[in-house]
Image (cartoon, rainbow, N blue to C red):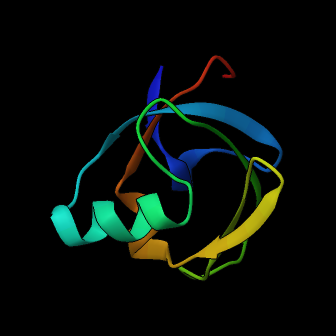
Amino acid sequence: MRVSLIKLKGNQKGKITDISGGGALQHKLMSLGIYKGREITKLSHFALRGPVAVKVGRSVIALGYSMASKIILESNDK
């Protein structure tokens, strides 16, 4: 099931299949360790389009809502 990062629930994992943004966004995310094929875990989501906390490897990163909405994941969870 392909879903945007913001649609995942807390503590769900997914594998990144696409980043629907320009080269600048993809470069910025890659510098944070977020790229196609990488598995990430969504830790929490703050209400009203707030930041999304994710775990990538051993790092915890907070992404802005619009940036997180452009990350498309393959999730086995329903």
Q: Nearer the viewer, residue 59 or 51?
A: 59
Where in the figure is residue 72, as x and y percent of width and height? 40, 41
Q: Is residue 32 above or below residue 20?
A: below
Q: Is residue 44 above or below residue 51?
A: above
Quarter of the image holding residue 47?
bottom right
Residue located farthest toward the front when viewing the structure as drawn: 31
67 sits to left or right of 53? left
Q: Nearer the viewer, residue 68 or 40?
A: 40
Q: Nearer the viewer, residue 27 or 15?
A: 27
Q: Residue at x 41, y 37 (%)?
A: 36
Residue located farthest toward the left when viewing the structure as drawn: 22
19 sits to left or right of 67? left
Where in the figure is residue 29, as x and y percent of width and height? 43, 63
Where in the figure is residue 22, as x and y percent of width and height? 16, 63
Where in the figure is residue 15, as x and y percent of width and height? 55, 30
Q: Residue at x 53, y 79 (%)?
A: 49
19 sits to left or right of 60? left
Q: How many marks?
A: 0
Q: Residue at x 78, y 61 (%)?
A: 59
Q: Nearer the viewer, residue 69 or 36?
A: 36
For the C terminus, the image quarter is: top right
Q: Is residue 35 above or below residue 39?
A: below
Q: Residue at x 30, y 60 (%)?
A: 26
4 sits to left or right of 49? left
